[in-house]
Structure formats: C-alpha cells, structure tokens
Image (cartoon, coloured by chain):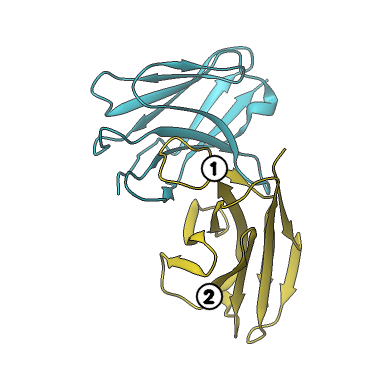
Amino acid sequence: SQTIHQWPATLVQPVGSPLSLECTVEGTSNPNLYWYRQAAGRGLQLLFYSVGIGQISSEVPQNLSASRPQDRQFILSSKKLLLSDSGFYLCAWTSGGWATNEKLFFGSGTQLSVL
Amino acid sequence: DAKTTQPTSMDCAEGRAANLPCNHSTISGNEYVYWYRQIHSQGPQYIIHGLKNNETNEMASLIITEDRKSSTLILPHATLRDTAVYYCIVRVALGYKYIFGTGTRLKVLA
C-alpha cells in the first residue's frame, strides 16, 4: 500500500534561517506531489505541485521554493525564513496522470514556527 | 479555477444527520467534487467524491444537484468525533490543482 512520510512534525526556526522540509511517498511511482500551507485558523493554500522529476509549478510567489530530485521525493526550501512563513505545511500526493478523479492523500504535516 | 463557497460554521446534535452544503457554480463538466475533513493539527482526510451521480460510502453520502452547481455532504449519524473542518473542493480540469476554500467548521454537540 502507498504511504507518505513527512518530517519533521514540528520545527522552530529563527527569522533569517534556512528551511528544508522533506516529503517522500512509498508504494507508487510517478506520483503528482503537492505542498500546501495552512496559516493559523485558515484554509489550505496550494504552494507548489510537481508532475515529474525536476518539474515544479509555483502557485504563489513568495519566500519559498520546491524541488523534486527523485520521483517520490519532494522538498520545500527557503534561504531565509520570514515571520510570515510560520504555519502548518502539508505534503500530498495523487497518482500521476490527467485523470480528474484521483484522490489526494496528505501527510501528517509540519508545524513551523518562525520566531 | 472553479471556486467553492461553504458556510463558515455549523452545529449538529450527536446522532442526527449533518448536512453540509457547498456551492460550485462555475464547475466544468468534467470536474469532480471532493470532500475532505481536517481534525485539528492533522492532514486532511478524504471522505468522498463524485461527478454527477449521488455517491455513498462507509463515511458519508454526497448529493450533487442536477445542474452540478451545488452539492451536499451528509453524515448520517454524526458523532463527537465528526467535529472537524470540512472542505469541499473541485479538482481543476486539464490541470493538476486541488484548490481548497476556507471550509465549514462542524461542531457536533452532545
């Protein structure tokens, strides 16, 4: 069966420090991968998605970047964190392809606090 | 992108049916409607999805209007554990995006 791993669960970082969040999916190949962010008390905002190795689509210009160095690995990064980067970061995946009835599966999330 | 609108919050008595509405008036013909729920500090959990016909699974039922401009998620016998934020989303056609709105905060009351 397919599983998604996301770590760390919680992270406290000072302003101006770098960030690297990693997500990996097991049990499938060529998944579509997603990064969402949820500010406190708000809905989910789509940040990036990827449909293949090295391919990244950015939804919101901001202080973050994403990379997909391997088929089932998705990384969210920042060179210098801002206070506004605080939030709950969620990785998600679907089976690859154009089908519009694929379910989106989420990881357990990373709670990032920038102080 | 097809957008969805939902009420901000709803209450439901334990044991009663919870009916959560969603408007998606700009939905395209081949775009599916999905429902997810999120319990505090966890990743959203898939509930159900549908295109045109009503759908039912072990968790809930989904009723989609004939014009597909709105839908209702039904939790037939709500329990305290169903207290969560419920998101209605549309999977964008000819693309890969799943766009979430602000959701409905459902509170099940004892």
For the residue carrying disc 2, how many other residues have a C-alpha within 10 Å: few (<14), some (14-19), or many (20+)? some
Location of residue B6 in the rendering, given as x and y in whole percent from the top left corner: 39, 36
Q: Which colour represents chain B?
A: cyan
Q: Quadrant of the N terminus of chain A?
A: top right
Q: Residue at position x 67%, y 50% from top?
A: A107
Q: Amino acid at mark 2?
A: Leu
Which quadrant of the figure has residue B109? Answer: top right
Above/below status of B42 relative to A70: above
Residue to which mark 2 is pinned: A64
Q: Residue at position x 30%, y 20% from top?
A: B65
Location of residue A44 in the rendering, given as x and y in whole percent from the top left corner: 50, 52
Above/below status of B54 relative to B100: above
Among the chains pictured, the one given yellow colouring is A
Residue to which mark 1 is pinned: A104
Q: Residue at position x 59%, y 30% from top?
A: B107
Q: Residue at position x 55%, y 71% from top?
A: A66
Specify whether A40 is left or right of B96.
right
Sequence-earlier tag: 1 or 2: 2
Location of residue B103 in the rendering, given as x and y in whole percent from the top left corner: 47, 41
The chain holding disc 1 is A
How far apart marks 1 and 2 lie (CA) works out to 22 Å
Specify whether A49 is left or right of B83.
left
* A57 vs B23, nearest the viewer: A57
* B105 vs A111, nearest the viewer: A111
Location of residue A110 in the rendering, given as x and y in whole percent from the top left corner: 69, 60
Q: Are marks 1 and 2 in contact (CB under 8 Å)?
A: no
* B86 vs B89, nearest the viewer: B89
Callout 2: SS: loop
Q: Amino acid at mark 1?
A: Leu
Callout 1: SS: loop
